[in-house]
Structure formats: structure tokens, C-alpha cells
Image (cartoon, grey):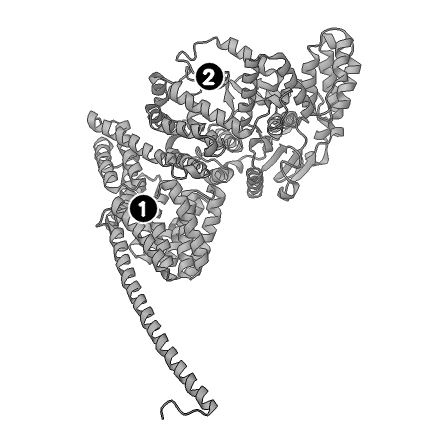
């Protein structure tokens, strides 16, 4: 359970629940609880869906807290209520993971299901679709066990900037409601522009909060706030009326104005002056608050204030107080100091509050966020305002410039702000409290670099990235990164590598600059050094075995087969000596050894290894559920069968695996999609091209929805689909798909990786099939050079391309000879035609024949 908790990383709504109820008086939103839509949602016998939309600051979060209280009072025996507040601090995926953990605590799963869940990738899923594919079956199972389950999700639109992700969540919630008759879902979001009405699934009931609906509630709250302030009590009626009239149905606007009025002092004159200058909208109030900070802060304070607000607006996750305090000296033009952390933290927090005023909030858990999501939207909307004579003109910046500054801060911190003690603390996963910015900078420097604008305008940033990767802090960063990301570290590293490649390719003068390729070489060098240290120390501990395994794994993914075999063999020997074959580490090593044998074209050895792994896993199987490990091994074994040409056996194996996957993990789980892709390859090899095309297209669509268009697994399907189209003589489609797969693999894996070379070889075959012999020869030569370098001259794939080149030369020679003969025949035929024409022409004139 502890492992599941660390993977799900649930977020508690307790603090947000208390925060959103502050200042709300009894009876607020009582009108909504009596609406037919809400009453039907609560009292309906089956599952139901209800969405509330309203403008920013209209009290949707307070309404969610009030509904939570009401449901806790009226729920029937056995009923449960789940509450989640979305926002920049709580993304959509955090909502789903929190719901899953809450269900685990209240319902529970058997040990086998927990084990499968922990191996499903639930902790690393970055999108709604991927996460739901990982948890769908256990989620539905646990939801069905509670009758009824009220699920309240506040601020769906604030969880992410992408409407597609929001709509994915609404679709998945609709599927959940249809699959389980005991759940009732309530969500809130902002008005139409954030979730378009046309895109909302049809089963949702939608209620819009209008200003006239909440005006009575705003009046109650305002009266309470005003009468509670001694300085305002004497003028309470006038102040209340003015605030309610100008609120436009927005609690947030009233709250911000009350912050202003609280400091006006006793007597009606100052309050009247403030009331006369009331801004009529939130954006005007934001203008006013920024201008007041601009007028009251000195230049250094203003610089820190502006940069802090922008960082809070653009950070991909909530920032902590320690992270902001660590970066604030650099925001003022100073450098990182070795004695970082040795300062008056309480005093710094007080200055942070004074600088930001009412525009930022410091929560009890140490996170800092803007006063409202609408303020971040305001900053981004106002970017590029030309005037610098006002506060807004001074604070508004180009977003790319802000990302450039943030990436520089992160890289400078990693290069100069951390000593050996700090890196050691990061490696050992202990609390590096002195190094507040370490975790954020390690995880997100690539994010800010890639959003900083074209490399041609950021030459110093390109050099800084190269310097970082080439020095010892870069090595330490990799080890800390691997520790913090967990088992998905290599995939995350490949994603960062691809993002850096895309960024660099946007500047023509840097198209050949291999900073992103250096990441792959960098990972390889670190893995090699770590493995070499194990050999020097002769240690056989679990971390030592893992280092050897990691080195073999990385070498295998880089196409360095001989070196991969060396490290994997040593890791296997150590693991067998320490644990025998019946350990997860030994099984993982055996699986990678099988992959290695397949790439070496030693298919019988790969088959033997996988059958051995499958037998061990079945012995470890508890008899209740099929584990994800068994399904993966069966999948891999079926692929080996098809590589051996045992197509019937491969098809049977894949069909059995697919049935189990659909039953245990769902028909759109990554394992099920991988099995369908293998079935398509079998169909292609059997000559059933239409079936293969249909299967590949279905898998491609599902993988693109789950993983995105540039993921290596998506490019794999694109490449397979191109092969089918080539065999169908759909050359135009095949060429487009091959080129897409090649470009993506060059970016992600490198130009000489065996998988990239396979795609290049396929393009050569396509060119040859279209009689574009010179172009085909160019592709084959590139593949031959790369395979000789990576696989050696005797590898079957190297021999294959060598024979293909010889065959192409013979075919080209024959083609040229046929062309020459055809040309000679053409000239002979032309000469005879000319003689015949002359003969006929002379006869028509009555001339003598050619031969008298």
C-alpha cells in the first residue's frame, strides 16, 4: 500500500475545503440546493452527471464545499462523498490518482490487483487517457462497491490549459457513469470559452450561474465582512450597496476590494474616496493592484515582484516557498551563494508577502499560488503591452522572454548553486532542505528552455546547455533525475531529448548542433561509469546489480549489442548468486537478454529464455489474476515466433494474450495495443494485407490518443503501416509514413540507431520498387555504413543489406542494358519508318522506286 501511495501521490482536499469556506455565511447558495437540476441529481435512482459553469470568482469552489457538507448530512447508509479541488496546484491527473487512492482506502483491492496496479505505469502517466487505461478495471470495480458514490470535482478547467484534456476527462467520467450505476458526478468550470458547450458530452446536465443568481449571496457575505470591520461599520450600508452593485456576480472582486477598504482607516472620507474609484471588472482591479505595487516598491523589490508573479503564472507545477526564496536573489541580479539556506526564513517569507500583497497566496503546506487562475490569464493576455510608464506596462513581458530567464535561473542553479553535499543528498533521496530549487530545476530546465524562443535568439542559452551537459554537475543531475522520476526515467529522458532536438532544429544555424544527441551519449557515459565502479569495488549488493543492469539496458537501447551483452551477463551472474532466478531483478535481466538475442538474430536462444521466464512467472502466479508481467512475456514470445516464421503459432499466442489483456487490463491498454500490432504483422506476413492495414490504423489512432504523435511506440506503428501500404502499391502513402517514422526516430534515437536504419532500409526498398535506383542505392549505402558500425559485418541484417546492394547493382546493370538495347531498337525502327515514308512519298509523286 505504501508503494501504491507513492505512485498515486494523492492530494488532500482538506485545506482547500477549509480555505474556500472562509467568510461564507450560513444560507449561501441555498437557492442552488433547491434547483430541480441539483435535486434530480441527488435523488435519481441511477448514476447522473451535473456540471456548473460560471465566470471566474463567482463562488464555484465555495459551492462545491457547501454541496460536500450537504451530501455528508443526507447521504444514505453506505454512501460516500469524494471531494477534489482542481487548479494549477492540482492537475487533472492528480484528481484521478487521488480518487483512486481514496477508493483504495475505503474499498480496497486484493494483493494481485494491487501488484498489477503498481506495475501499470499509474505513477508516470502524464495524460488522462494513459492514466485511465492503467486504472480503468480496478477503478470501475471499486466504484461499483459503493452505493451511492458522490464525486465532486471543482475547477475542471483550471487543471490544465488544454481543452482536449478536459474533454477527455468528461468523456471518461461519462463512461464511468454508464459502466457503474452507483456514482453521481458533479463538476464545476468556468464559462463557455473554457469548455465549449458544443463539445460537452450529451449526458451532462449543465447549469450556468448568472450574476443575478448570486447577488443575494454576495450581499449576505459583504454585509458580514463590512460589519466585522470596526473602521467600516459606521458606513456599512453605503459600502455594501456600492460593492454589491459593482460586483457583477463575483465574490472574488468583493474580496479584493475589501482588502483595499480594510486599510483605509476610520471615518467615511477615505472609504468614500476608494468607493468612487471602484474598478468595474476583475481585470481593472488587477490593473489597480499592480499599479499600487509599482508605486510602493523600489526598483529591486519591483523586479523581484514581477519575476515572482510570472514564475507562478508559468510554472508547470505549484512552487514552494523554499523554491521561490532560493531563486529570489538571482531575480534581483545577485548570484547563487554557497551559504544558501542560511537566512532568516520567516523574515524572507514576510518580505515575500509584502512584495506580492493580495496577488499571491502562501498556503499552510508551503506552496505559493496566484490569488486566482484568472490573474495568470490576465498576465498572459496583457503580454507585450508597449507602455512602461505604468505598473501593467512594466510587468507585462513576452512569455518567451520569461521562459528564457527561468531556464537560465534553473541552469545557473544546477551549475553553480549546489555543492557536492547537495548532490549527494539528491542521489540518496534525503531532504536537501538547503537546496530549495534543486528538485524544480532538475525536472523543468528542459521545459523552460524549449519554450524560450528560437535558438538563433538564444545563443548563450544553447552554449549554457552544452556546458551543463559536459561538466560534473550534469552527471550529478542525471543521477538525481533518475532517482526522482523512477522506473520511467529513460522514457522521460527520451522525451526531453526529443523536445530539445525539436527546439534546436527550429534555428537553421543549429540544425547540426548535437546538444540533444549529447543527452543520449551523456546517459550512456554515466551508465558505463557506474557499471565500471561496481567492477572496481567488486560489490554484489542490490544497487550494484541495478547499475550493471542499467548499463546493459541503456547499451541495448542505443544499439550497442556486444557491450549490452557484457553488462547483462555480469548482472545476471550477480543476481543469480544473490537471489537465484526467482527474483524480479533476475527476471528483468532475462527479458532484456531475450531482447538482445532477438536483435542479434539468435531467435532460438531468445525463445528459450522467454519460455524460461514464463515458467518462473507462472510459478510465482497466485492463481487469482493474470499478472501484467506474464502478459508482457507472452506478448514477447509471440513476437519471437513470428520472427521465426511460425505464423500460426504466433497468431494463436497473440490471440490468447489479447483475450487476457482485454479481460484484465482493458482493450485499450498499452499491452493490448502492442498485441494487436503484433497480430497485424502476422496478418501482413500471411498475405492478408487489408486485415493488417485495418489493425495498424486502429492501433495507430489509439496510441496517438494515449501517447501523442511523436512517441517511439507511435512511430513504430507508422513504420509498420508504411510496409503494408508499400506491399499494396500505395506508394504515396507509404512514402509519407516512412518519412514521418524516419524523422521521428532520428530525433528520438539518433541517425545510426538500428531501428532508424531499419526505416531507412525500407525507404530504399520503396525507391527500388518504383525504379528510383540511384536514390535506393543512396539509402542502402547509408544503412550498410550504419549497420557495419553498430552490428558488425557478420550480423544477418548487415549481410542482408550487402546482398541487397549487390542485387541492386545487377538489376541496375540489366536495366541499363535493356535500356541500351531498347534505344538501339528504337533508332533502327525509326530508320525503317523514315525509309518507308520516303518510299510512299515518292510513289505518291510518281517518282521512280527507290530500287530501280
In the displayed structure, 693 sits above or below 137; it is: below
Query: Quadrant where the C terminus lies?
Result: bottom left
Q: Nearer the viewer, residue 685 or 824?
A: 824
Residue 226 badge: none
The span from disc 2 to disc 1 (Cα, nearest Å) is: 44 Å
**Number of numbered discs:** 2
Mark 2 crowd level (few <14, some 14–19, many ≥20, 10 Å Cα): many
Residue 537 occupies which quadrant of the picture? top left
Is residue 214 visible to us here? yes
Dot 1 lies on which element?
Answer: helix
Kindly check if marks 2 and 1 are in contact, taking CB atoms under 8 A apart as contact. Answer: no
Is residue 5 visible to us here? no
Query: Quadrant where the N terminus lies?
Result: top left
| 167 lies left or right of 679 | right
| 532 lies left or right of 465 | left
Would you name the residue on which mark 1 appears? Answer: 754
Residue 336 occupies which quadrant of the picture? top left
Among numbered discs 2 and 1, the one appearing first in the sequence? 2
Residue 75 coordinates in the image, percent (x, y): 62, 30
Residue 468 coordinates in the image, percent (x, y): 37, 26
Dot 2 lies on which element?
Answer: helix
Residue 721 coordinates in the image, percent (x, y): 42, 54
Would you name the residue on which mark 2 appears? Answer: 326
Q: Residue at x 31, y 40 (%)?
A: 558
| 782 lies left or right of 321 | left
Residue 342 coordinates in the image, percent (x, y): 43, 9
Task: Spot the residue most to the front.
Answer: 847
Mark 1 crowd level (few <14, some 14–19, many ≥20, 10 Å Cα): many
In the displayed structure, 306 sits above or below 604; it is: above
In the displayed structure, 601 sits above or below 489; it is: below
Amino acid at each position: 500500500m505504501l508503494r501504491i501511495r507513492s505512485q498515486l501521490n494523492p492530494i488532500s482536499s482538506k485545506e482547500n475545503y477549509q480555505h474556500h469556506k472562509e467568510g461564507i455565511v450560513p444560507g449561501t447558495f441555498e437557492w442552488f440546493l433547491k434547483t430541480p437540476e441539483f435535486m434530480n441529481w441527488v435523488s435519481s435512482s441511477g448514476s447522473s452527471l451535473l456540471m456548473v459553469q460560471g465566470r471566474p470568482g463567482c463562488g464555484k469552489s465555495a459551492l462545491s464545499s457547501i454541496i460536500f457538507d450537504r451530501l455528508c448530512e443526507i447521504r444514505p447508509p453506505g454512501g460516500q462523498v469524494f471531494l477534489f479541488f482542481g487548479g494549477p496546484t492540482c492537475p487533472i491527473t492528480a484528481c484521478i490518482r487521488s480518487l483512486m487512492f481514496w477508493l483504495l482506502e475505503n474499498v480496497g483491492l486484493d494483493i494481485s490487483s494491487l501488484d498489477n496496479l503498481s506495475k501499470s505505469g499509474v505513477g508516470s502517466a502524464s495524460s488522462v487517457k494513459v492514466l485511465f487505461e492503467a486504472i480503468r478495471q480496478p477503478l470501475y470495480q471499486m466504484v461499483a462497491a459503493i452505493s451511492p458514490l458522490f464525486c465532486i470535482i471543482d475547477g475542471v478547467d483550471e487543471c490544465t490549459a488544454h481543452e482536449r484534456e478536459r474533454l477527455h476527462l468528461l468523456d471518461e467520467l461519462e463512461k464511468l457513469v454508464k459502466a457503474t450505476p452507483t456514482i453521481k458526478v458533479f463538476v464545476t468550470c468556468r464559462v463557455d470559452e473554457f469548455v465549449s458547450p458544443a463539445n460537452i458530452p450529451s449526458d451532462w446536465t449543465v447549469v450556468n450561474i448568472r450574476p443575478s443568481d448570486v447577488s443575494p449571496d454576495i450581499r449576505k457575505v459583504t454585509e458580514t465582512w463590512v460589519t466585522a470591520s470596526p473602521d467600516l461599520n459606521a458606513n456599512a450600508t453605503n459600502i455594501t450597496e456600492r460593492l454589491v452593485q459593482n460586483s457583477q456576480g463575483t465574490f472574488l472582486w468583493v474580496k479584493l476590494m475589501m482588502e483595499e477598504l480594510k486599510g483605509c482607516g476610520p471615518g467615511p472620507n477615505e472609504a468614500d474616496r476608494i468607493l468612487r474609484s471602484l474598478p468595474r471588472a476583475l481585470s481593472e482591479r488587477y490593473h489597480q493592484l499592480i499599479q499600487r505595487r509599482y508605486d510602493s516598491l523600489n526598483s529591486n523589490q519591483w523586479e523581484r515582484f514581477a519575476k515572482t508573479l510570472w514564475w507562478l503564472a508559468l510554472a508547470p507545477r505549484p512552487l514552494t516557498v523554499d523554491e521561490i526564496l532560493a531563486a529570489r536573489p538571482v531575480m534581483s541580479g545577485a548570484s547563487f551563494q554557497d551559504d544558501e539556506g542560511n537566512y532568516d526564513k520567516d523574515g524572507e517569507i514576510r518580505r515575500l508577502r509584502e512584495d506580492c500583497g493580495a496577488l499571491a497566496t502562501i498556503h499552510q503546506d508551503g506552496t505559493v499560488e496566484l490569488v486566482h487562475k484568472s490573474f495568470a490569464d490576465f498576465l498572459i493576455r496583457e503580454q507585450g503591452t508597449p507602455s512602461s510608464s505604468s505598473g501593467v506596462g512594466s510587468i507585462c513581458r513576452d512569455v518567451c522572454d520569461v521562459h528564457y530567464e527561468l531556464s537560465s535561473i534553473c541552469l545557473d542553479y544546477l551549475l553553480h548553486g549546489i555543492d557536492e553535499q547537495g548532490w549527494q543528498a539528491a542521489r540518496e533521496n534525503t531532504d536537501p532542505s538547503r537546496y530549495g530549487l534543486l528538485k524544480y530545476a532538475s525536472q523543468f530546465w528542459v521545459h523552460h528552455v524549449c519554450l524560450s524562443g528560437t535558438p538563433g535568439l538564444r545563443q548563450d542559452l544553447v552554449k549554457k546547455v552544452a556546458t551543463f551537459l559536459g561538466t560534473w554537475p550534469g552527471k550529478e543531475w542525471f543521477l538525481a533525475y533518475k532517482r526522482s522520476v523512477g522506473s520511467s526515467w529513460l522514457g522521460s529522458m527520451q522525451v526531453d531529448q526529443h523536445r530539445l532536438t525539436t527546439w534546436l532544429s527550429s534555428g537553421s544555424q543549429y540544425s547540426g548542433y548535437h546538444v540533444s544527441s549529447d543527452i543520449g551519449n551523456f546517459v550512456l557515459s554515466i551508465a558505463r561509469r557506474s557499471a565500471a565502479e561496481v567492477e572496481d569495488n567488486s560489490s554484489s549488493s542490490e544497487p550494484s546489480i541495478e547499475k550493471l543492469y542499467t548499463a546493459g539496458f541503456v547499451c541495448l537501447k542505443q544499439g550497442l549489442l556486444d557491450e549490452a551483452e557484457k553488462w547483462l551477463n555480469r548482472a545476471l551472474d550477480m543476481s543469480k548468486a544473490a537471489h537465484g532466478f526467482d527474483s524480479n531483478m533476475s527476471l528483468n535481466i532475462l527479458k532484456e537478454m531475450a531482447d538482445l538475442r532477438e536483435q542479434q538474430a539468435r531467435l532460438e536462444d531468445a525463445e528459450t529464455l522467454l519460455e524460461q521466464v514464463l515458467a518462473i512467472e507462472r510459478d510465482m502466479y497466485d492463481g487469482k489474476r493474470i499478472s501484467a508481467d506474464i502478459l508482457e512475456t507472452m506478448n514477447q514470445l509471440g513476437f519471437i515466433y513470428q520472427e521465426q516464421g511460425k505464423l500460426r503459432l504466433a497468431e494463436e499466442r497473440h490471440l490468447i494474450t489479447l483475450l487476457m489483456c482485454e479481460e484484465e487490463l482493458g482493450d485499450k491498454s498499452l499491452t493490448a495495443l502492442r498485441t494487436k500490432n503484433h497480430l497485424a504483422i502476422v496478418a501482413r506476413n500471411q498475405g492478408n494485407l487489408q486485415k493488417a492495414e485495418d489493425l495498424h490504423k486502429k492501433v495507430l489512432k489509439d496510441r496517438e490518443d494515449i501517447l501523442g504523435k511523436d512517441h517511439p511506440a507511435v512511430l513504430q506503428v507508422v513504420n509498420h503501416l508504411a510496409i503494408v501500404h508499400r506491399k499494396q502499391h500505395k506508394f504515396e502513402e507509404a512514402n509519407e509514413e516512412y518519412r514521418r517514422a524516419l524523422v521521428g526516430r532520428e530525433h528520438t534515437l539518433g541517425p545510426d540507431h538500428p531501428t532508424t536504419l531499419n526505416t531507412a532500409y525500407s525507404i530504399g526498398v520503396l525507391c527500388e520498387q518504383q525504379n528510383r535506383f540511384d536514390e535506393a542505392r543512396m539509402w542502402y549505402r547509408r544503412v550498410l555504413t550504419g549497420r557495419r558500425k553498430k552490428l558488425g559485418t557478420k550480423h544477418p541484417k548487415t549481410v542482408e543489406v550487402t546482398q541487397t546492394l549487390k542485387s541492386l547493382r545487377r538489376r541496375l546493370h540489366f536495366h541499363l542494358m535493356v535500356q541500351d538495347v531498347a534505344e538501339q531498337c528504337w533508332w533502327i525502327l525509326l530508320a525503317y519508318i523514315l525509309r518507308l515514308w520516303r518510299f510512299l512519298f515518292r510513289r505518291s509523286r510518281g517518282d521512280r522506286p527507290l530500287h530501280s
